[in-house]
Amino acid sequence: MSTRTIKVDTLARVEGEGALHLRIRDRRVEHAELRIFEPPRFFEAFLRERGFDEVPDIVARICGICPVAYQMSAVQAIEDAFGVTIDARVRALRQLLYCGEWIESHVLHMFMLHAPDFLGYDSAIEMARDHRELVESALQMKKAGNAIVRVVGGREIHPINVRAGGFYRAPGVGELRALREPLQRARETAARSVRWAAGLDFPAFERDYEFVALRHDTEYPMNEGRIVSSAGIDTDAHGYEDHFEERQVAHSTALHSLIRERGPYLVGPLARLNLNAATLSPLARSLMADIGLALPCRNPFMSILARGLEVVHALDLAIGLIEGYQAPDPPHPGVAPRAGIGFGATEAPRGLLWHRYQFDDAGLVRAARIVPPTSQNQPTIEADLRELAQRLVDSPDDALRARCEQSIRNYDPCISCSTHFLRLEIERP
Amino acid sequence: MNAWSADSRDRVALIGLGNALRGDDAIGLAIADRVVERLSSLGEHDARACLDLHRGALDALAIVAAWSDAAMAIVVDAAVSGAAPGSLHRFELGADAGAEAGTDRGATPLRTALGSTSSHGLGLAEAIALGAALGRLPPRLVCFAVEAQGFDAASGLSRPVENAVHAAVAQIADEIIVAWHHRQLSPPRIPRGARPVTD
């Protein structure tokens, strides 16, 4: 009998601290774990007894990469609890802010974290020496996304301009118009990037996922829609807990989310694309046809293509929103708290982000529950790892480890903040 | 090559790195903000006006973007090197550092001397290496780092780090003033993104 244990104590090029642990006995993968040390649940406790008006700024601190997503799900839940209907101009401005975050988050992942896997580099810096134009493209696109978040959100990191009912300050028309030209240039670059990504060498690997994402009748889902799945789930944010549950597992500080009847499921760009391709912008749709991406796409390594198409879509949408922009006046209506429970579900760059808050009649938070995309994808990541490692069981440790790490990065897991060390431990009896 | 080459823009990027909610990690933000205040209080309005302030837990791409158009960049961060808390480190990359594109000259001593406090492993050292690889280092890059005592999840600096702020602010403001007067920059323009933001 032989046992092989492959451990990566801290994963590189993921957003935060996680580790990989594989155990192989007699050429059979017994055990595949993505270990997560992320502490998001502390935030649910931090929020208790806080006023509703503090919630958007507190939850923005959960993530330095996708703070807007947390703010969007939170304000939606607050407005749901208090019976607030938002102005169409506020809705459009929120979409624009979310576009900025999708662009910067997706571009960072595609080029700095994921592309080195496909091109055979250990880091984006090494890659930049040989593929300067690729990183320059990323720089240009990300800058355009950052500018949206800075102008609409008040600053690039942990924006401060979002509040229940609207915004603290509505940007002027001129401020937004100044973003248009860089966004148009970024859109051309993004289209080229999709064509570049389509030429990458994708491992032949498919699994039969249940895709879960928001769906909207007329819009590619971002900050509004029903929660649907490829196996027939169709509910609003209120009904989320009827279909999904979270379980604690010993090796992760993130809870594992499962569909009650069926188990693991997939959220994120690939799920969104599979469920919503018809509502992509015309340019993104035509690019998808040009590169011959057929749906359903069940190859998780192709998530880089879904991200690329979503960058094009977000740039298209952002340019349109800026051209049609009318500043909401006033930027926010008065919001009167009342006792109740509110729900919010939006599409973070990495997938569905669901919030639930219970408020008292003064608008203080009594209870909060936040289900981030990575905890929803974690069981699926582990299922991918088990199957992938089994197929590659005869490969040398280095090759096996590299492919497994790449497989984790398919999900752009947003774990927490970390430095990166990499250590591989192999145990042989 | 003159650090202030004729084709470089007349801007100074002041980049304060850190997280205001993680103890001494906020030192870069605090110093950057106070440098801006000091220039104003000294009446150095023209030197103040040539500054573009960037602050926060910026990733490597954002750092490179922040200094890409600048004639000079000053980066302020926290350090973990084993030195006494509050110690001020200063590194300067000369005008030719970027000429060796493809090397991570400058980044290696920084990384080994100061350790890494960045999120996502894509912080200042990586930004310098990336900037070198892309030929996007500013003509002059000066990095200041204050040795941290701790990064607890709380706001407020530790006493030794707080005690180091005044001298660091004075030194950095002086460097900017000297650079300004040496350069004889053109009349000030309205700085982009230069409004201080309070956490």
Image (cartoon, coloured by chain):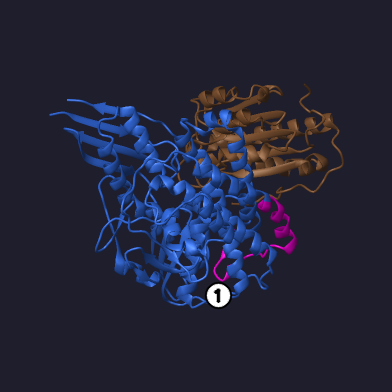
Chain colours: A blue, B brown
- Please provide percent x and percent y for residue B65: 65, 40
Quadrant into which the N terminus of chain A falls: top left
- Examine the rendered structure and indicate whether residue A221 appears above or below residue A379: below
- Where is residue A385 shown, x and y percent of the image? 30, 42
Pick whichever, A209 or A362, lies toward us. Answer: A209
Q: Looking at the image, which is closer to me, A70 or A244?
A: A244
Q: Position of residue B24 (x, y in %)?
A: 52, 39
Residue type at mark 1 is Val
Residue A102 part of the magenta-drawn span: no
Evaluate whether residue A158 shows in this view.
no
Query: Is B133 situated above or below A268?
Result: above
Chain to which the residue tagged by mark 1 belongs: A
Q: Residue at left 25%, top 34%?
A: A393
Residue at (25% x, 30% y) in the render: A394
Mark 1, residue position: A335
Please state if B3 lies on the left or on the right of A294 as rendered: right
* Residue A170 magenta: yes
Report the residue at 59% width, 22% height from top: B105
SS label for mark 1 = loop
- Tell me the quarter of the image containing the C terminus of chain A: top left
Residue A239 seen by the camera: yes
Looking at the rendering, the stretch of residues picked out in magenta corresponds to A160-184
Using residue A202 as the reference point, say whether residue A250 is left or right of it. Answer: left
Number of residues whose C-alpha sits closer than 10 Å to that of mark 1, classed few (under 14), some (14–19) or many (20 or more): some
Instruction: Tell me where residue B61 sits by quadrant.
Output: top right
In the picture shown, does residue B137 fall above or below B32?
A: above
